[in-house]
Amino acid sequence: MAAAAASVGHSSKGGGGRIHRLEVENFKSYKGTQTIGPFFDFTAIIGPNGAGKSNLMDAISFVLGVRSAHLRGAQLKDLIYALDDRDKEAKGRRASVRLVYNLPGTGGELHFTRTITGAGGSEYRIDGRLVTWDDYNAKLRSLGILVKARNFLVFQGDVESIASKNPKELTALLEQIAGSDELRREYDELEEQKTSAEEKSALVYQEKRTIVMERKQKKAQKEEAEKHLRLQQDLKLLKTEHLLWQLYSIEKDMEKIEAELEDDRRSLQQAREDNQSSDNGLAAKRKEQSAFLKKITLCEKSMSKKKVDIDKKQPELLRLKEQISRLKSKIKSCNKEIDKKKDDNNKHLEEMKRLQSALADVTSAIEELNEQGQDKGVKLQLADDQVQEYHRM
């Protein structure tokens, strides 16, 4: 008599649940319907060789989804009870194993049934409801039963086999029992995703650094551009002030020249009036007329000179207007132009002084001629061209 070196376990995921009983029908050496159980926290099954201890283990493995290759059968039909070869050849043979599982806490039962059909296939039922293998396996996994790892049974020889394994094989076995090997593909995919994510993160970090550097550069460029715009605005204001000052200076010069011209005109008018009054005594005033003609000639020269000065000022004014447009791009030349304008202003002042001096000389000469004419009473003798010029004037 020998004892089966196997035990039925439960996972912590099942929350303390355990197998209550087995209902076997025509499975291996169990003819007809057999109920085995109830099982307790510790149950020993003993008997002589050939009594069916291993077949009980196979029944538990079968109902929990283990493949026939691991149940000492080439195909599922080999697991159906047969007295002899004739029974094996009979058609429509069926077998089933039902496992009644006690749910923890509630005291309820959960029935797992696997049936070998007459066609040699498998049917899976949960509480009598026909389900697919995926649903069946998912329900087992929810109870902590991993079919592929076979973590619910310890078969005869498993202890010695485990003891003889090296660390790498033990690790693989533990991963299989824990079900982590089923997650290897997902782990590898996640590892690749992690690597890809790290690469993307590094790339994003590099792009972020590049963006930060570009942002700093753009900020510096923005500040430089704003500074440039402020300087351009200041330059524009300075140019405007400078041009306004130039225009103001030119207007003042023109006013002065107009005033001088007006004085010359008044002087001319006065001379003409004096000349008109002298016409009444032309016979007696020939000599005085000559003096007045000289005075008129001087005044005309002075007027011509003034007109020449005005004409000279006109190109200067045009040149200054042209320089106004060029000053927008030639700020350095503005300072030189200012100095040049200052020199021109000084020249104008000197010219004004010279003209005033010339006017004073003319006035003095006229007065002297008048005095001489009054003292001597000499009649002025004029040439024909002088008389014509006189009448023209």
Image (spheres, rainbow, N blue to C red):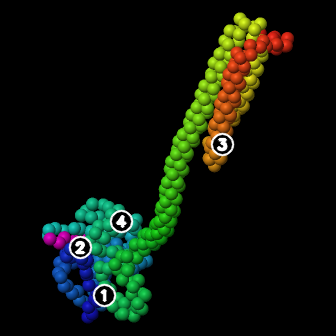
Local secondary structure at mark 2? helix
Residue 362 falls left or right of residue 95: right
Q: Nearer the viewer, mark 3 or mark 4?
A: 3
CA distance for labels 2 and 3: 110 Å
Q: Disc 3 vs disc 4: Cβ atoms closer than 8 Å? A: no
Q: Nearer the viewer, mark 2 or mark 3?
A: 3
Please tell me which of labels 4 and 1 falls first in the chain: 1
Q: Residue 14 has which mark?
A: 2
For label 3, the residue is 343
Please tell me which of labels 2 and 4 falls first in the chain: 2
10 Å neighbourhood of mark 2: few (<14), some, or many (≥20)? Answer: some
For label 4, the residue is 133
Of residues 326 and 110, the one drawn nearer to the viewer in this rendering: 326
Q: Disc 2 vs disc 3: Cβ atoms closer than 8 Å? A: no
Please tell me which of labels 1 and 3 falls first in the chain: 1
Res 372 → quadrant: top right
Q: Residue at x 34, y 72 (%)?
A: 65
Q: Position of residue 279 (x, y in %)?
A: 72, 7
Residue 212 visible in image:
yes
Local secondary structure at mark 1? loop
Q: Nearer the viewer, mark 4 or mark 1?
A: 4
Of residues 124 and 176, the one drawn nearer to the viewer in this rendering: 176
Res 297 → quadrant: top right
Of residues 189 and 98, the one drawn nearer to the viewer in this rendering: 189
Q: Nearer the viewer, mark 2 or mark 4?
A: 2
CA distance for labels 2 and 4: 20 Å
